[in-house]
Amino acid sequence: MIRDGIVPWDGTVAWYAAVPSDSTVRWDSSAATTFDRGYGVMAADLESQKQAAAEASAVLVEDGMTVGLGTGSTVAHLLPALARRRLSVRYVSTSPRTEEMARGLGLHVEPFSLIEGFDITIDGADQVAPDGWLVKGGGAAHTREKIVAVSADRFVVIVDSTKTVQALHPPVPLELIEFGLASTLRRLGTVKLREAPKSPDGGVIADFTGDFTDPRALATWLSETPGVVDHGLFPPQMVTTVLVGREHSVDTIVISHAGP
Ligand code: 5RP
């Protein structure tokens, strides 16, 4: 729903049309694993898919690790799964929401200033393309999420099955500097301010709504546009694994980093 140039965001609703992926390009079936949750024919709803992916990712966290935590409703399933494991782990959060929930569950959250990098970062996504490109930032946390993702040895993405798409499509979330905002918006052209609070770093949240076919070209252009703090396009080079919660299982997609 787009109203008066503002894209409302309630942080819970999947706002992108979902196209099932054929996963032909980088699907590594030799590395695929399935987590059988024993649900039988029941429980096909999205929350259980998110929970399944989140619980599968929690198993990857080990005692003594440093772990980056993403933001969103899928990550909200991850935090209790981590808390149940009672590991000794140093966590860094990408948002006040995640931090508050994590602390409430007894997880040890530290400022990012104290940690140089992570053994693993786990986060959700809004769209996952077959070649491993992501769109993130539905929860407006994409700038911090990208920093935490690139700081990790392994970046594991957890999604329900509606997030896999045949090709990325708009909107692409943006964080913009308030100074000169009208000029930045004019230069970006097809962009809508989001009805959302500023980021914890003071950035204005917006969405690029123009059509695109080449995510790399769009990512480069957005990164080079003065006034753009960061955008929600995450290249495959950042991504290690995508865990896709499905009706009765979790698929593991290992992103190949071979080639150009
Ligand atoms: C927040 C994000 C989220 O990871 C993304 O929007 C997916 O959210 P959800 O798990 O609620 O579907 O990028 O900025």
Image: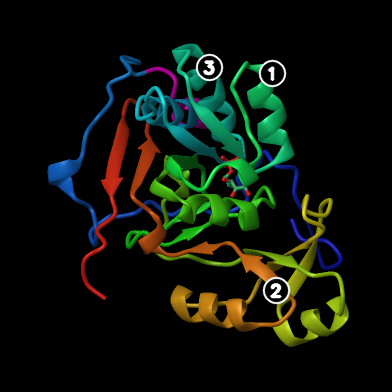
Amino acid type at circle 2 is Val
Return the x and y of residue 22 as percentages of the image width and height: 28, 55
- Of the residues under marks 2 and 3, which one precedes in the sequence? 3
Residue 177, image x, y percentages: 79, 70
Instruction: Report the quarter where the C terminus lies.
Output: bottom left
Magenta-highlighted residues: 42-49
The residue shown at (24%, 62%) is 25
Element on which disc 3 rests? helix
Which sits earlier in the primary sequence, circle 3 or circle 1? Answer: 3
Query: Could you say where residue 244 lies in the image, as x and y percent from the top left?
Result: 37, 39
Residue type for callout 3: Ala
Quadrant of the image occupied by residue 232: bottom right
Q: Earlier in the sequence, mark 2 or mark 1?
A: 1
What is the distance, in whole Å, between disc 2 and disc 1 at their CAs?
34 Å
| Quadrant of the image containing the N terminus | bottom right
Instruction: Relative to 194, say whether 125 is above or below.
Output: above
Classify 53 as above or below 22: above
Residue appearing at x 67%, y 38% in the figure: 12
Mark 1: C-beta under 8 Å from nearest atom of ligand 1: no
Tag 3 residue: 83
